[in-house]
Image (cartoon, rainbow, N blue to C red):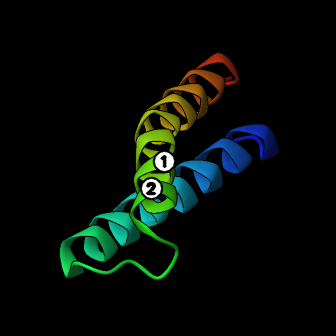
Amino acid sequence: MTPKSGLFLAGSCITAIAAVGSMFELGSGQPDLGTEITAIILAISIPLTGLFFVAAVRDARANIK
């Protein structure tokens, strides 16, 4: 694993945590940041999680020696 793939993997973890947190906030009925902002965070973090994860795997596979 390279530092670059590690950063992508860290980004994937952070965005996954943001997505789960947003789902819990929306499920509670009254999100702290408001429904619109929390929904935007959720909508952005779900695809970013996948993109960061795929980028981390591709980078790690490209650098296998």
Question: Which residue is pictured at 63% across the width and 56% down the height?
Answer: 10
Q: Is residue 30 left or right of residue 49?
A: left
Q: Is residue 24 left or right of residue 55?
A: left
Whole-percent x, y for residue 29 in the image? 22, 78
| Pick the front one: 19 or 49 | 19
Question: Which residue is pictured at 44% across the width and 33% down the height?
Answer: 47
Whole-percent x, y for residue 52 in the image? 57, 36
Few, some or many residues within 10 Å of mark 1 (<14, 14–19, 20+): few
Q: Give the number of the disc on residue 2.
A: none
Direction top: furthest residue:
62
Which kind of residue does numbered mark 2 sit on? Answer: Glu
Numbered disc 2: secondary structure: helix
Question: Which residue is pictured at 53% across the width and 49% down the height?
Answer: 12
Q: Is residue 24 left or right of residue 52?
A: left
Locate the N terminus by quadrant: top right
Which kind of residue does numbered mark 1 sit on? Answer: Ile
Numbered disc in front, either 1 or 2: 2
Q: Kindly identify which residue carries mark 1.
A: 40
Locate the C terminus by quadrant: top right
Numbered disc 1: secondary structure: helix
| Pick the front one: 63 or 13 | 13
Whole-percent x, y for residue 60 in the image? 61, 30
Res 64 → quadrant: top right
Q: Are marks 1 and 2 in contact (CB under 8 Å)?
A: yes
| Pick the front one: 50 or 28 | 28
In this rendering, the answer to whether 16 lies above or below 2 is: below
Few, some or many residues within 10 Å of mark 2 (<14, 14–19, 20+): few
Question: Which residue is pictured at 53% across the width and 37% down the height?
Answer: 48
Q: Is residue 9 left or right of residue 29?
A: right
| Real-space Cα separation, disc 1 to disc 2, in angstroms | 6 Å
Q: Kindly identify which residue carries mark 2.
A: 36
What number of labels is visible?
2
